[in-house]
Image (spheres, rainbow, N blue to C red):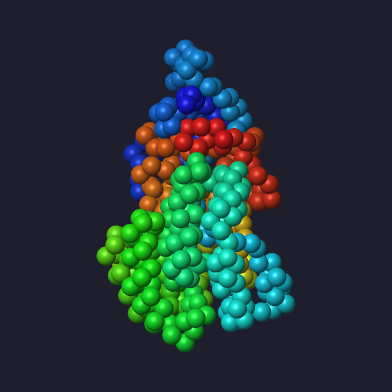
Amino acid sequence: MKNILITNIKELIQTETKPVQKVSGAKMKELKTIKNAYLLIEKGLIAGFGKMKNLDLSNYPDKKYRIIDATDKMVFPAFCDAHTHLVYAGSREIEYIDKIKGLSYEEIAKRGGGILNSASRLQVATEKELTEQALERLYEIMQYGTGAVEIKSGYGLTSESELKMLRVIRNLKEKSPLTIKATFLGAHAVPPEFKGRQDAYVDHIINEMIPLVAAEELADYIDVFCDKGFFTVEQTERMLMAGMKYGLRAKLHANELASSGGIQVGVKYNALSVDHLEFTGDDEIKCLLDSETMPTLLPGAAFFLNMVNPPARKMLDAGLPLALASDFNPGSSPSGNMQLIMAMGCIVLRMLPEEVIHAVTINGAYAMGVEDTLGSIAVGKKANVFITQKIPTYAFMPYAYGSNKIDTIIINGSVQ
């Protein structure tokens, strides 16, 4: 691995001399940058950065360093996408047409579409097929600037298929340069064979699935779809407690379809993040303020489903941190483009460019448990960064929503 020195950077974004775990409230409007900067990468890590006037190039011989001239270009930490479902078998554009015709998410699910459609396809797909499809998606999101990604199971809904999904994610960790976290989401929906017996399916997850997942050490986290028409607060608590016994910290789907109590149960069990949050009121905001749980918004899903948007501005003004993630999946957010998510954060959620940059970097890293190694430009952190094309300001990243503004991707200190 050759060391890298990036010189003449127009602006180095999200710099930290004293790294923080997350950024909250009014501080999300503040963004530390260095103009006319350099960035030094050694042995896959960020080794130094600062103003060009303080750099002595004679210390960096060509034989040991690859020098990249970033004149008129900017350098960002790579995005941390803390919520995806990118292991799946095939697309669902037929349901997309049903949505256009006016059917709701819940109506499509009742007809055997939605998650159950993906589950039936995944159950017959091989690990090899799923791995090949997912690797293509990982390569695609990397080209748009993602350096770390959380991937959930949940399209299996049987012990065999959930384990298959998680093994695929383990394969991806080995084959892809991206930092990947795996989340067990057996409680994504109730499979047809348990129709009318939802508690029995919860028992099945607790007594069979979770022990099997833990025995093979296949997951970093456990997730539950705690929402109207899916799993109740009581059922969610039972599954989270069972997961915690095996060392699986909670991440939660909550309050996407209604005020479900999902946010409160997530905070109660110290969830790393609660995600979606379209229905978030004063009680939920107060609950989150006293917690270590990261509120994670998924504007791509609300956009694609034409649903109400979460009250991002109200949450920020109350002092909360926010992360933004893609929710990359075949049914409700078929895109992992985090540049587009940044644009939605600004246009739809009324967040400032500085706020969305925090939301897709350091706060996204926190929401997937990698804030100590990723999410900012700090000495000792993993060198996951990208060099932009020639752009006028960092606000151009969310502003020019229809194009890829990235010139060079560096992951683990290597140009991809």
Q: Work out whether 330 lies above or below 7.
A: below
* Front residue of this view, candidates 107 and 364: 107
Q: Residue at x 43, y 56 (%)?
A: 182
Using residue 63 as the reference point, say whether residue 300 is left or right of it.
right
Using residue 136 as the reference point, say whether residue 66 is left or right of it.
left
* Front residue of this view, candidates 212 and 28: 212
Toward the left, the furthest residue is 245
Image quarter (top left, top right, bottom left or bottom right) of the C terminus: top right
Q: Is residue 296 visible?
A: no
Q: Residue 394 placed where, x, y %?
A: 57, 42
Q: Residue 196 placed where, x, y %?
A: 47, 87
Q: Is residue 200 visible?
A: yes
Using residue 20 as the reference point, say whether residue 14 is left or right of it.
right
Q: Work out whether 405 lies above or below 133.
A: above
Toward the top, the furthest residue is 58
Count of numbered marks = 0
Q: Residue at x 48, y 53 (%)?
A: 169
Toward the bottom, the furthest residue is 196
Q: Work out whether 124 lies above or below 180.
A: below
Q: Residue at x 55, y 32 (%)?
A: 415
* Front residue of this view, candidates 176 and 105: 176
Q: Residue at x 39, y 56 (%)?
A: 218
Q: Residue 250 placed where, x, y %?
A: 36, 63
Q: Residue 6 placed where, x, y %?
A: 52, 27
* Front residue of this view, candidates 277 and 103: 103
Q: Quadrant of residue 265?
A: bottom left
